[in-house]
Amino acid sequence: MNNEELELSFLGDLMLSNDIQGLLADVASQMKADDFNNQEAKQTFSVINEIANNGDEVNPISISQAGVDISFVSSVAQRGLSANNAIQKAKMIHSLAKKRNLYLKAQQVMQNLASGDDVEAVKSDLSTFLNGDVDVSSNTTKKIDEVLNPTLDSILSVKENGGIAGITTGFKTIDKYIGGLLKGSLTIIGARPAMGKTAFALNMAEESAKRTNKPVLIISLEMNNEMLVKRMFAKESSISSEKIRDGNLDETEIGRLTFASEKMSELPIWFDDTPIQSFDDIRSRVLRLQRQQGELGMVVIDYLGLIETGNERNSNRVNEVSKISRGLKVLSKEVDAPIVALAQLNRGVEQRTDKRPLLSDLRDSGSIEQDADNVAFLYRDDYYRNEGEEQPDDEISTVEFIIAKNRNGKRGTIQLAFNKKYSMMTDWVNESQGGATW
């Protein structure tokens, strides 16, 4: 994993270049100074870059005058063969450095575990190391003509999609105003308890899977898989959640459940109901499913406040939530799919006359507002009119979908219909009354 001769001959090749600035620019796309194992070689490489950036000639004299030992410079100069070899050698030096750094990190992980360090903290540290290992050889700089055609194709596909740029939410009115959920976007859906946020998320995930046939992953840290599927059964079979819960079904209803099960089994939906998960756990599960399926349509997380980082003992919850929201945003870009995370709101909402949520009501908000592309809230006025008591004859509830942040469009409020009996949330039937208000 160390090759001192390679590093020294590489420096000698640099000194032979007639276009040192151009060569160093090419080298920078393949390696960095920290890739050197030999410290004198690292110092010499930095000095060569400094001299070239100042527009001065790079030669043994100028390098030694900049503070590098003359005998070392002389030894390096003698090893130079051809400037044409420099790029290939830079790639080899970078490859050796990656192996060396990973080996050293693996040793550190074993030492930390042997010392009794917290497992989640060790995993988090390792994940940070792996995520930060950006390959300098990947060229992410693109000329405009490389971006034009893909962008034009994207614009035309939006037209063909009826004006929806992203993955459908399953709600026509919401898609109309936010353009669907864009790839690489993070959406936060906040609400107080009993507003219907889990029903909303399930309906969105199911309808998206139906319409796009793209894999949807539902990570539930609150409800188990059986509870979630029972809610989906109620919606698909039009049998009340209460009857499904109690098993109070006649033969006809059993037949409807069986038929619904057959339809639902064809959906590309995956569940993970592990009750305690850190962000690293979630990331590994998302990446694993992406590797298995080739792509993801959407990831839904219920809910943000139950995600752990493994470092709670050393930090306050606001900082932890900030790390999580930033991590989710990075993950959405990494898998090139929208991530939707549900969130609880502060109790301060209950103290106001107008209990409609605001961005400031996000619990332990940290940088959620800055990290998220979309932030929306669910609000049911009838719940507060009835002082938290559900009325048995009030099956259909009006739910306000309040778009508080929309990075790519307008804000506003959209009315949805929530059928509590069947755990089903849909667009408001009378769109002339249930559209968006601004």
Image (cartoon, rainbow, N blue to C red):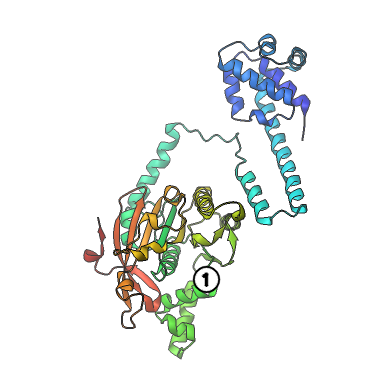
Residue at 73% from the left image edge and 30% from the top image edge: 37
Please report the residue visible at 60 percent of the width from the left and 39 percent of the height from the top: 134
**Quadrant of res 25:** top right
Q: Quadrant of the N terminus?
A: top right
Residue 223 image offset from top left, x and y in percent: 52, 71
Relative to 396, residue 56 above or below: above
Can see residue 216? no
Location of residue 69 in the rendering, given as x and y in whole percent from the top left corner: 74, 15
- Residue 102 at x, y = what percent? 71, 42
Residue drawn at (57%, 18%) of the image: 21
Secondary structure at numbered mark 1 = loop
Q: Is residue 16 left or right of residue 415?
A: right
**Amino acid type indicated by mark 1:** Met
Instruction: Kindly tell me whether residue 209 is visible in this rendering.
Output: yes
Q: Quadrant of residue 402?
A: bottom left
Residue sitting at the far top: 61
Can you say whether 139 is above or below 159 in the image? above
The quadrant of the picture occupied by the C terminus is: bottom left
Mark 1 crowd level (few <14, some 14–19, many ≥20, 10 Å Cα): some
**Residue 224: x and y, percent?**
54, 72
Q: Is residue 148 left or right of residue 227?
A: left
The residue that disc 1 covers is 223
